[in-house]
């Protein structure tokens, strides 16, 4: 691992992998919002971090100046052999217009409310399976023994991959989002096993078609033609990364909050009718995802002289804590009635899988509190948080009450 000098001032030298940012970014973002409100860094080849809802929304909706080709900030900005714009490596999230609209339309039928809602019994069974394994235990880790298994299980079944391969996908997500500081020559070869795995699955699905998302991608046609192989693989990558770590983190953050706030837990147990509002507030207050853009050309943004190829890290979670956009923005209100949060992004790249994420989060919480109506953190200092652009607790040691 390359040595990194500690951050002295996040306004002029921000780093989203700094231990203080990873442990608790909210005071940092609040400070930046008041002082900047667009922070700058020379790290990662140069980048910017807007912290207000208005500015994050403005950039997210500006496809003229900002490209989505690269969405994960790293040291290897334009790797050799990477799919070029407008498709990018994981369409549609890495796609620019006009290709973006085509790629997004491909995904929408498979993520429609009707298709997603039909998955609820499977998701409940999956949650029950992992919760049954915890029965009778007074102490367990709600992160590593529960939250981390739900979204990989759902996505594995959705893609039509063997259930026993879920561990491989969690490792891949860790590689993509957490290990950005590895030198390129060390990081790139780590992707090869997954490329081979996808190739094998594509070949198998071509020989043995079935009713799953992989077969859908292989058979869907755009303009009378099937998708290019790199489009299919890229959308598989997107489904794994966007579908696993984000929801895993949201489930973990929600359980961490309930373990830390007994009054909210009590209300959720006794007032199940507020679950829908609670899910939205969990998403707002603990939004897990920040997403990157790159500058197409030099551009001045609210007095900031942004340069071609600079990174811009869109702080959707920071936007969700902006007092100018939300009343009592810094407070978690479990039954908040008006909640137009940005947890699923803003603009044309707003998450296409938001219906599925909401369903997984709701069911995972419902099934958990159905079995454990009282629980608390066993050791708050032992809680660990993921590094990178998707923030969520990885270890949540809890004690179950009677």
Image (tube, rainbow, N blue to C red):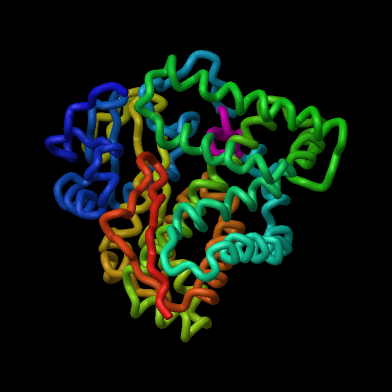
Quadrant location of the C terminus in the rendered image = bottom left
Q: Check the image and name the residue furthest to the bottom.
A: 270
Between 380 and 333, the one lying in front of the other is 380
Taking the spot 38% from the left edge, 42% from the top edge, the residue there is 59
* 83 to 221, vertically: above or below: above
Residue 237, position in %: x, y? 60, 35
Task: Answer left or right for 76 relative to 1.
Answer: right
Taking the spot 23% from the left edge, 26% from the top edge, the residue there is 4
Q: How many marks?
A: 0
* 214 to 335, vertically: above or below: above
Q: Quadrant of residue 187?
A: top left
Residues in magenta?
A: 89-100
Residue 335 appears in the picture as rendered: no
Residue 243 appears in the picture as rendered: yes
Report if residue 327 lies within the magenta region. Answer: no
Taking the spot 51% from the left edge, 51% from the top edge, the residue there is 148
* 137 to 110, vertically: above or below: below
Between 13 and 401, the one lying in front of the other is 401
Residue 75, position in %: x, y? 36, 23
């Amino acid at each position: 691992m390359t040595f990194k000098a500690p951050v002295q001032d996040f306004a002029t030298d921000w780093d989203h992998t700094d231990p203080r940012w990873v442990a608790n970014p909210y005071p940092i973002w609040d400070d930046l919002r008041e002082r900047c409100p667009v922070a700058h860094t020379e790290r990662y080849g140069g980048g910017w971090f807007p912290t207000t809802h208005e500015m994050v929304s403005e950039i997210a909706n500006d496809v003229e100046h900002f490209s989505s080709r690269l969405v994960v900030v790293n040291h290897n900005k334009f790797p050799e052999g990477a799919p070029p714009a407008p498709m990018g490596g994981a369409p549609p999230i890495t796609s620019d217009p006009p290709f973006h609209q085509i790629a997004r339309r491909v995904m929408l039928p498979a993520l429609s409310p009707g298709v997603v809602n039909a998955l609820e019994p499977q998701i409940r069974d999956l949650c029950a399976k992992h919760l049954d394994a915890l029965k009778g235990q007074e102490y367990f880790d709600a992160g590593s023994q529960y939250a981390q298994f739900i979204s990989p299980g759902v996505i594995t079944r959705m893609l039509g991959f063997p259930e026993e391969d879920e561990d491989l996908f969690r490792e891949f997500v860790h590689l993509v989002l957490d290990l950005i500081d590895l030198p390129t020559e060390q990081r790139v070869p780590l992707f090869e096993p997954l490329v081979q795995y996808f190739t094998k699955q594509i070949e198998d699905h071509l020989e043995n078609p079935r009713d799953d998302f992989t077969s859908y991608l292989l058979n869907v046609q755009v303009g009378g033609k099937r998708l290019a192989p790199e489009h299919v693989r890229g959308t598989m990558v997107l489904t794994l990364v966007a579908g696993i770590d984000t929801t895993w983190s949201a489930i973990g953050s929600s359980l961490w909050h309930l373990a830390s706030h007994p009054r909210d837990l009590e209300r959720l147990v006794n007032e199940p009718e507020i679950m829908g509002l609670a899910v939205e507030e969990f998403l707002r207050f603990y939004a897990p995802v920040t997403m990157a853009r790159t500058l197409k050309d030099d551009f001045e943004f609210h007095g900031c002289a942004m340069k071609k190829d600079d990174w811009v890290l869109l702080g959707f979670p920071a936007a969700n804590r902006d007092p100018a956009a939300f009343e009592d923005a810094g407070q978690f209100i479990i039954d908040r009635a008006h909640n137009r949060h940005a947890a699923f992004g803003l603009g044309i790249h707003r998450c296409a899988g938001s219906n599925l994420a909401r369903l997984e989060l709701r069911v995972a919480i419902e099934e958990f509190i159905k079995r454990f109506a009282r629980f608390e953190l066993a050791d708050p200092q032992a809680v660990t948080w993921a590094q990178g652009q998707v923030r969520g607790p990885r270890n949540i040691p809890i004690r179950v009450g009677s």
